[in-house]
Amino acid sequence: SSAQGYAYDFFYFVQQWPGSYCDTSSGCCYPTYGKPPSDFGIHGLWPNYNNGSYPANCDPNNPFAISQIQDLVSSLQTNWPSLSCPSSDSSSFWQHEWDKHGTCSETVLNQHGYFQAALNLKSKTGLLSCLKSAGISPNGGSYTLTNVKAAIKTCIGHTPYVECNKDASSRYQLYQVYTCVDHSGTTLIDCPVFPTSGACPTSFIFPSF
Ligand code: 5GP
Ligand code: 5GP
Ligand code: 5GP
């Protein structure tokens, strides 16, 4: 832990492209409340250490309680939808993320603060409009990793990490974007360390949703 005594050093704020979750060979299920918008969705806000490792499942005594975020549920349904099967109201995804990751930052963000911080970061990063303004659109076209990263850096001032997966025809596609956030969960920062998962080739598809 750092000199300030925080139990983590920074956050990865991870957003997923729903088209790339859904068009894999595993498929997806829309939430019970309907198809999410054609926009990046939140995957999670993950406490991390500067050496690349991370804490998880930090406090079983502080389990997810939807009663603490009632005022955020409508916004979470739109901005943090679950696309896993079977269809759900997405709350099991929020529960998983809070229990696994959120409890590791509970000394800084309580449950309401954690979910509010993620929603604020989604709007602050404005990822889809950022990419579109650089001519990078979810239209099934092919884009280079260099250009995608440069476009996001232009918008948010920091280089992101881009993760790819494969569609049902084994074509690489843009799956997740990681940005780094200071320990307070509010300020975007240069990443102290980049993830290593989800390798991307030089160019890949940005599928529609
Ligand atoms: P995967 O193996 O699919 O990359 O990751 C599985 C899960 O492990 C993620 O959804 C996340 O919960 C956690 N995870 C993977 N990599 C990282 C990381 O670098 N930092 C943190 N905090 N969690 C991670
Ligand atoms: P991680 O541990 O990888 O942060 O979270 C992934 C877990 O959340 C898995 O158990 C996965 O089934 C579940 N999950 C539910 N909805 C979604 C979704 O829309 N996207 C992803 N990546 N995982 C989801
Ligand atoms: P460099 O650090 O020279 O930019 O990249 C080193 C290696 O990491 C290269 O193979 C490059 O393709 C890969 N890489 C760099 N940035 C990213 C990224 O955001 N996502 C993925 N998946 N690979 C990256």
Image (cartoon, rainbow, N blue to C red):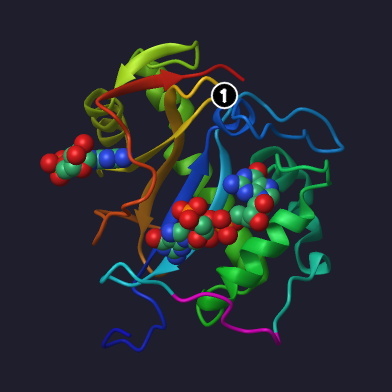
Residue 57 painted magenta: yes
x and y percentages locating residue 108 in the rendered image: 50, 77
Q: Is residue 2 above or below residue 174?
A: below
Question: Which image quarter is the C terminus in?
Answer: top right
Q: Residue at x 71, y 38 (%)?
A: 78
Mark yes or no: residue 206 visible: yes
Q: Is residue 79 above or below residue 4?
A: above
x and y percentages locating residue 92 in the rendered image: 77, 57
In the visual, does 34 lie left or right of 132?
A: right
In the visual, does 113 lie left or right of 89?
A: left
Mark yes or no: residue 157 visible: no
Q: Residue at x 24, y 54 (%)?
A: 190
Of residues 76 and 94, the one drawn nearer to the viewer in this rendering: 94
**Magenta residue span:** 55-61
Question: Which image quarter is the N terminus in?
Answer: bottom left
Q: Residue at x 35, y 71 (%)?
A: 53
Instruction: Check disc 1 and report its element: helix, strand or loop.
Output: loop
The residue that label 1 is drawn on is: 168
- The three-letter code of the residue at mark 1 reads Ala
- The secondary structure that most of the magenta stretch takes on is loop
Neighbor class of circle 1 (other Cα within 10 Å; few <14, some 14-19, many 20+) is: few
x and y percentages locating residue 64 in the rendered image: 74, 71
